[in-house]
Amino acid sequence: MAVTAGLALLLAFPPYGWWPLAPVGVALLAAATHRRRLRAGAGLGFLTGLALFAPLLAWTNLHTGYLPWVLLSLLQAGYLALLGLATAWVSPLADRFPVAWPALTGVLWVGQEALRDRTPFGGFPWGRLAFGQDGSPLLRLAAVGGAPLVTFAVALAGGLLVAGVWWLARARRQGTEPRWWVPAAGAGAAVVLLFTGGLMVPLAAPGSGASVTVAIVQGNVPRLGLDFNAQRQAVLDNHVNATIELAGEVTAGRREQPDLVVWPENASDIDPLRNPAAGARISAAADAIGVPILVGAVLAGPGQGQVRNAGLLWRPGSGPDLEQLYIKRHPVPFAEYVPLRNIARMVSKQVDRVRADFVAGTEPGVVRTPAAVLGDVICFEVAYDGLVRDTVIGGAQLLVVQTNNATFDVAEARQQLAMVRLRAVEHGRPALMASTVGVSGFVDPDGRVSDATGFNTRAVVVRQLRLTEGRTLATRLGMLPEVLLAGLAVAALAGAAVLRRRTGDRPD
């Protein structure tokens, strides 16, 4: 049951997208760990974690070898081991108050994700239940309580499923007649109402603000893998040439004139502020298209052996606008910087492939352009609730995710696009993802994707967007739903401790 739970959860995520299986996976894990000893609960949770995360994160071993993939999968599975242990721990509460079992399941999942999203080294939120619901009616709940509320709803549905089956089995075993089926039917009806209720959540109205035409340039790379930037000039030239070609199509009347062009992360791994030739190439593209370009660039400094991952606004005629510069706030540990490098080197000397540590920025990614105020986040930052919300609080009208998927595969890119869909709904903003190799595309405030590109191909997409104003309830509440739900999880653990003490550590 534990292994099947992990596989069911896996299939809920892109590229499979069978989102109804997520509650089934939650239910199977809850059933497998109920009334188990604590060590058994932890072990079963760990099995679920391995069955989920090992294939879900398989894209991490495509170009780095097996060790990072294995270590990351084991680490993430460890959090589901804690969840399994916690589920076993609260079994007496579930037995004493069966009607509370679904809610217990929901709050424990939120608590587990809150911990996993933040530890260690800032956490790794990949694989949250909410990120597998991009095609589900529950996605709309993001506009009310963000990703934590969506996760709670999915886990609540799973808890209702397992409670319904348990009530049904108990009633039939006890021979309760003639209405032994009523509690189980009630649980099933509650699941249906939960998903139907998701459709009732109002989303942001069509934008009443100004319209803006945006072009995404996906220039592609000479070859996939960690050495995609071994030909850094070629990557830059791909994006420059694609932009100049777009300018020619605009002049010929075959394309609409954009108000803004977005290049992906790592479009220029040659520092254009220090390399005059690279700067001249970007200026040529900006001058040709006649509008600003948001350039994904790697900038040297500020210290020796340090670099920065940046989104830099490049204006036609005047070049880089250093007032509109976003520095990535959450560099990826062991990929963009190496914490505890001497200790990490004992595990694998591969860490020395990261020669220069990326330095984190300190300001939200609010980039003001003549066309719109952008909320810029870079690559994996889209998975972190606070980093995206900070841009909207700062005035962002359009969410922009600059990413480089050249070191991964199409599954990773589609998983990331699912996160963009959730963020668009959560904050009621149009959004886009610009990738070096795909998948790039636009997302409406209701989560619908438009003009999605293929993978490992060159593409330019242009679309007119209607900007939105105001803030959703989720934007206003911020962390509050997660704090409340995680707090209830802690209260449940404490309540189970009291009940165990009274009953001699045995479920009722």
Image (cartoon, grey):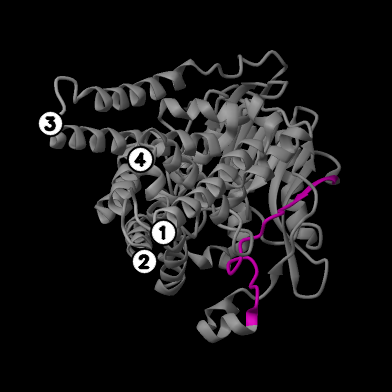
* Precedes in sequence: disc 2 or disc 4: 4
- In the rendered image, is residue 436 in sight? no
Instruction: Give whichever of 336, 150 is nearer the camera.
Output: 150
* Precedes in sequence: disc 2 or disc 1: 2
Q: In the rendered structure, find residue 125 and report the number of the disc placed on it.
A: none
The residues tagged by marks 2 and 1 sit, at their Cα atoms, a distance apart of 7 Å
Q: What is the three-letter code of the residue carrying label 1? A: Leu
Q: What is the three-letter code of the residue carrying label 4? A: Ala
Tag 2 and tag 1, C-beta contact below 8 Å: yes
- What's the magenta region? 323-341
SS of the residue under disc 4 = helix
Q: What is the magenta segment's predominant secondary structure?
A: loop
Q: What is the three-letter code of the residue carrying label 3? A: Gly
The residues tagged by marks 3 and 1 sit, at their Cα atoms, a distance apart of 32 Å
Q: In the rendered structure, find residue 22 and report the number of the disc placed on it.
A: 4
Residue 69: x %, y % from top left: 43, 67
SS of the residue under disc 2 = helix
SS of the residue under disc 3 = loop
What residue appears at the point 47 percent right and 46 percent down from the top-left corner?
Answer: 109
